[in-house]
């Protein structure tokens, strides 16, 4: 069996249906994989039940199918992988790279998002509920993002030791995403730039666990030309399940791929084939501003 050189993924949390912004990110990740003869996987990040919306997973998967974004291999559901995440937590605690933290939200409220290391030297397993934090180091983490360019962050200064398992027993996104990207052998991560801030923590955790780092590229958050971010009132409406061609072309415009006017009559698979053949990551702007005329119409 030949070794897969490129493996990308789309990893939505089932907290709601896909909207135009998520289509743009999913499409970019799909096209980059296909243009590189790679595989494109879908992973459902359902590890936070309180934030999930009933039926969202089905709606997301239906929308992907409808928009022609067919995935390779079977879907991985994070909800079925708790024991794997726990093994990594145990390993990090045994190695003294992580520790239990009993601090209350109230106790930390005066530290403005920076964890001051209160429980860092806690040796015994506490009797009261505890989170698990990863020890950070005061070193710069430099990452070259495929779209956003060089990013530098000192985790110890930025937020300090961060949570990898929550006090309520749920595994933190940062841990689950790093473990799964590694176990699924993901080589390229293309996702929305709302996750740019999380990347240094993921990168650091990969280093601590001895994992190779995937390549990262963050698609800018889309703003309407009045400078507003996607909101429920405009671009954050659920993707319509009619005329996927129109939305795909708008997404390609947003990604600055200049779809040909002739594609107006094309099928979904013709559009995706054209976009794969003409995929140009260097054309993706660092900020996506969509003119009023290109805004998806409100869903009926
Ligand atoms: N599950 C995350 C989200 O939907 C994205 C994870 C990722 O792409 O790294 O926001
Ligand atoms: Zn603590």
Image (tube, rainbow, N blue to C red):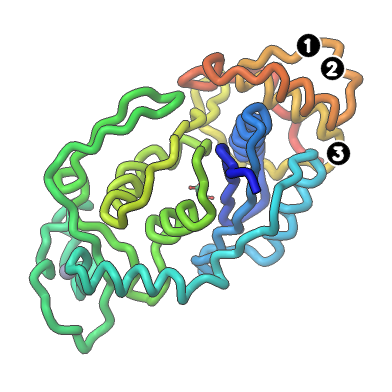
| SS of the residue under disc 3 | loop
Q: Measured from the top left, where is residue 231 in percent x and y?
A: 57, 38
* Nearer to me, 5 or 77: 5
Q: Earlier in the sequence, mark 3 or mark 1?
A: 3
Gap in angstroms between the C-alphas marked 3 and 1? 21 Å
Residue at 71%, 63% in the rendered image: 55
Secondary structure under badge 1? loop
The residue where tag 3 is placed is 242
Q: Is residue 244 left or right of residue 219?
A: right
Q: Residues within 10 Å of mark 2 (few under 14, many from 20)?
A: some
Q: Residue 19: name its quadrant.
A: top right
Q: CA distance from mark 3 to mark 2?
A: 17 Å
> How far is mark 2 from mark 1, CA to CA?
6 Å
Crowding near pointer 3: few (<14 within 10 Å), some, many (20+)?
few
Q: Image quadrant of residue 252?
A: top right
Judging depth in this view, the residue of 239 and 231 nearest the camera is 239
Query: Is mark 3 in CB contact (under 8 Å) with mark 1?
Result: no
Q: Which mark is residue 263?
A: 2
Q: Nearer the viewer, residue 53 or 34?
A: 34
Q: Is residue 157 above or below residue 81?
A: above
Q: Is mark 3 within 8 Å of ligand 1?
A: no
Nearest to viewer (mark 3 / mark 2): 2
Q: Which mark is residue 260?
A: 1
């Amino acid at each position: 069996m030949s070794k897969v050189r490129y493996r990308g993924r789309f990893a939505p949390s089932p907290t709601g249906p896909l909207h135009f912004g998520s289509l743009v990110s999913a499409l970019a990740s799909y096209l980059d994989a296909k243009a590189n003869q790679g595989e494109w996987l879908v992973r459902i990040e359902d590890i936070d039940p309180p934030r999930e919306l009933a039926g969202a997973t089905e709606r997301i998967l239906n929308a992907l199918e409808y928009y022609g974004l067919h995935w390779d291999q079977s879907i991985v559901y994070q909800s079925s992988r708790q024991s794997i995440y726990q093994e990594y937590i145990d390993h990090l605690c045994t190695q003294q790279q992580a520790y239990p933290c009993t601090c209350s939200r109230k106790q930390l409220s005066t530290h403005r998002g920076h964890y001051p290391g209160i429980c860092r030297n806690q040796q015994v397993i506490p009797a009261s509920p505890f989170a698990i934090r990863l020890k950070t180091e005061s070193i710069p983490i430099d990452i070259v993002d495929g779209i956003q360019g060089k990013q530098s962050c000192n985790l110890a200064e930025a937020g300090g030791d961060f949570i990898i398992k929550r006090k309520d027993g749920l595994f933190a996104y940062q841990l689950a995403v790093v473990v799964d990207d590694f176990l699924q052998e993901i080589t390229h991560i293309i996702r929305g730039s709302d996750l740019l801030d999380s990347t240094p923590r993921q990168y650091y955790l990969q280093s601590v666990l001895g994992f190779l780092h995937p390549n990262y590229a963050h698609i800018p958050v889309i703003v309407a030309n009045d400078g507003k971010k996607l909101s429920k009132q405009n671009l954050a409406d659920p993707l319509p399940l009619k005329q996927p061609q129109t939305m795909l072309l708008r997404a390609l415009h947003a990604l600055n791929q200049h779809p040909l006017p002739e594609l107006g009559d094309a099928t979904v698979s013709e559009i995706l084939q054209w976009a794969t053949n003409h995929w140009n990551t260097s054309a993706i702007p660092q900020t996506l501003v969509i003119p009023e005329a290109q805004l998806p119409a409100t869903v009926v």
